[in-house]
Image: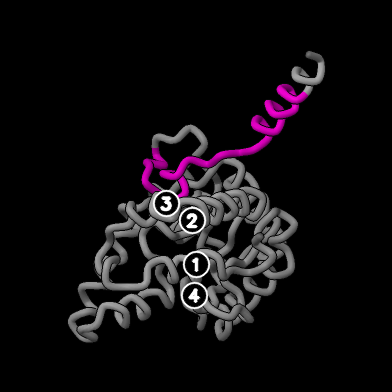
Amino acid sequence: MKKILFFLLLNLTFTTMAETIPLNKLIGQFNEKTDPNFVALDSTILPVNKPGMYLQKEVADQLTKAYQDFKIAHPNIPFIVVSATRNYAYQNSIWQNKWDRLFKKLKNEPKTAQEILKYSSMPGTSRHHWGTDVDITSVSSDYFTQDPKGKILFQWLQTNMSKYGFCQSFNHGRKGGYQPEEWHWSYQPIAKKFLAQYKKILASNEKSIINQLTFAGYNKIKLRDLIEEYVFDVNPDCY
């Protein structure tokens, strides 16, 4: 009897410790504005380029610390959040707009998808769904590689963001996935849990994810293969 109780307690402990992230949170099918784990960036000191952006509270707190330390070192250089949480509907609007424009020219579904995927995610596959990822100041590589202020910002981000838990999601040196994005930073302590859960569900029950993804062209592309590449081919520091 004692052995049975021991194993029951052990199982309960591991069940409690294991964090299960709901599928709708993984693929962005929720409203971040009403989620108690999220905070409006308008209520923080973080500079934003538009109102109505949200992040998970822990992510916003750590990003605020990074911002404050950066401004002490470089008070005259912009550090602005230009994108934060994007739910499925928001990401779908981005995808649809690009699809409508590019498909007219390319007239080929896989080629259209590949062109969009250079810098934009398929709805249901974006790290921005998780409330852990931000784009900082500019979404142009030229700003970070050619502009003097952008160079200083990127050098500081590379050197210091790990102190606050952030990694550069799409760096140079990866074999596939998105083009390098100097502006895209992910809060690794939480994002790695979302990534692991996404991988677990895709491996055990892929249809539970794939059946939810009904964006333009989804049924004309190798969706499973593209998910594998674009969700999982990220900076190893983000795992």
Tell me how far mark 4 sits from mark 1, CA to CA: 12 Å
**Of the residues under marks 2 and 3, which one precedes in the sequence?**
3
**Eye-nearest disc, 2 or 3:** 2
Label 4–label 2 contact, CB within 8 A = no
Tell me how far mark 1 sits from mark 3, CA to CA: 14 Å
Figure coloring:
one colour
The residue beneath circle 1 is 228
Q: The disc labelled 2 sits on which kind of residue? A: Leu
Residue 25 shown in magenta: yes
| Pick the front one: 152 or 33 | 33
Dot 2: element = helix
Dot 4: element = loop
**Eye-nearest disc, 3 or 4:** 3
Q: The disc labelled 1 sits on which kind of residue? A: Glu
The residue beneath circle 4 is 178
Tell me how far mark 4 sits from mark 2, CA to CA: 20 Å
Label 2–label 3 contact, CB within 8 A = no
Q: Residues within 10 Å of mark 1 (few under 14, many from 20)?
A: some
The residue beneath circle 3 is 27
The residue beneath circle 2 is 202
Looking at this view, name the residue that lies furthest to the top. Answer: 1
